[in-house]
Amino acid sequence: MPKDHVDPIAALRDNTSVPFERARAMPTEVYTSPTFVAAELEHIFSKEWYCVGRADSLSSPGDYVSCELAGQPIVVLRDGEGALRALNNVCLHRMSTLLHGRGSAKTIVCPYHAWTYNLDGKLRGAPAMTQNEGFCKDHYALPHMRCEEWLGWVFVCLDPDAAPVCDQLVEVAQMISGYDMTNYSEAFYEEHVWDTNWKVLAENFMESYHLPVCHAGTIGSLSKLEDMICPPGRPAFNYHTILKDEALRIAMAHPTKNDRLKGEERRMTYLLALYPSLMITLTPGYFWYLSLHPKGPGQVHIRFGGGMSNDFANDPDTNENFAQLKSLLDDVNLEDRGCTEKVYRGLCSDAATPGHLSHSERPNYDFAQYLMAKIDEGQAA
């Protein structure tokens, strides 16, 4: 049957009805169908928590980052009292978007007619409005969205009824307590758009099966697949762990300042997939992350950042080591982009057929189960 005649949601339901031991990759229509993207935006991205980055990048009053979540423009900022706020990023006059990208601002000034808002969202002033008898600036304030900080990460959500981030991820916090993830500082942040489906990139992160091949020129030799552990996923996340070679010294626990981790934990990397779309590589020494949002079936918007554990902050070679790491991560990203864009081109083929999953792709199976559960939940509501 031609792909445009296949119901992608029904196809995923069939796909996820079998146990992991017999599981296949998700149907191609799940990646290529505009209908499925619409379902994801309605039932997942408009309901779940979305990460805009690290709190330490929004440390001073007026620091902000903008995003679009399920079609809704949002700005997250640090207000004058030091609190994080998420505001609708649309002027209440002629509805231009307000702040763009990342930066710092003393006030929020509309780029169209210069209506100006305080950092709490209240209208501060509007030029040439004195002759409109119905206008009162005290009646104008930008709507607020939910915003929460968890272990140094900043999340926003459009759903007022969603469970708090800390409740959904309490098990993650317990598992990685020895890493003290709040105690990491962001050293770089970038935004990219790649020509692949967001789930292809998410799944690429969730499995290390591809490391020896896709990353043969970079990190393929630094981790051994036989050391990888892929436990069954949880409702709000999945993860796997892998042991880093001690040659990558900045991936190890600090020799004197980290006495929290013991034994093999001191070289263990957690690859955390926090649903729907925050992917964190967390080592005892450094972290990097991807926060993903779909741009139609064939493109993904990527927030890419990373940094070091503050345990290393005063070491004389930290900056040099991190510069080398950033160079390595850039090379890894180039490899991942090549692989994931090739996968999407292949998915668009009429002859593309999903194959059986490896035991090391357990997180991919759990991700498919999550997607199906959320879409079914949304359709039943």
Image: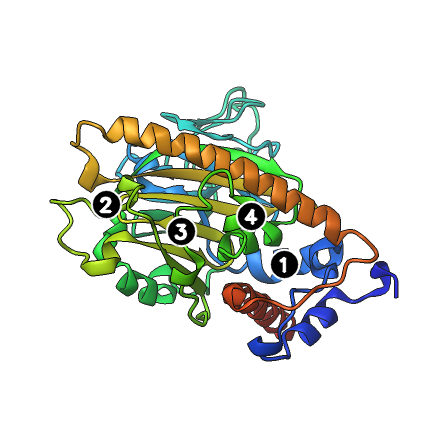
- The kind of secondary structure element at disc 4 is helix
Neighbor class of circle 3 (other Cα within 10 Å; few <14, some 14-19, many 20+) is some
Above-or-below relation of 21 to 315: below
- The kind of secondary structure element at disc 2 is helix
- Residue at image mark 4: 213
Q: Residue at x 35, y 44 (%)?
A: 287
Q: Residue at x 46, y 52 (%)?
A: 278
Amino acid type of the residue that numbered disc 3 sits on in the rendered structure: Ser
Amino acid type of the residue that numbered disc 4 sits on in the rendered structure: Val
- The kind of secondary structure element at disc 1 is helix
Between residues 97 and 206, which one lies in front from this camera angle? 206
- Residue at image mark 1: 40
Mark with earlier residue (1, 4): 1
Q: Quadrant of residue 342?
A: top right
- The kind of secondary structure element at disc 3 is loop
Q: Residue at x 46, y 60 (%)?
A: 160
C-alpha distance separating marks 1 and 4: 31 Å
Q: Is any atom of residue 79 visible in this view?
A: no
Q: On the rendered image, what quadrant is the C terminus found in?
A: bottom right
Q: Which mark is residue 183?
A: 2
- Residue at image mark 3: 223
Mark with earlier residue (3, 1): 1
Q: Position of residue 55 (x, y in %)?
A: 33, 42
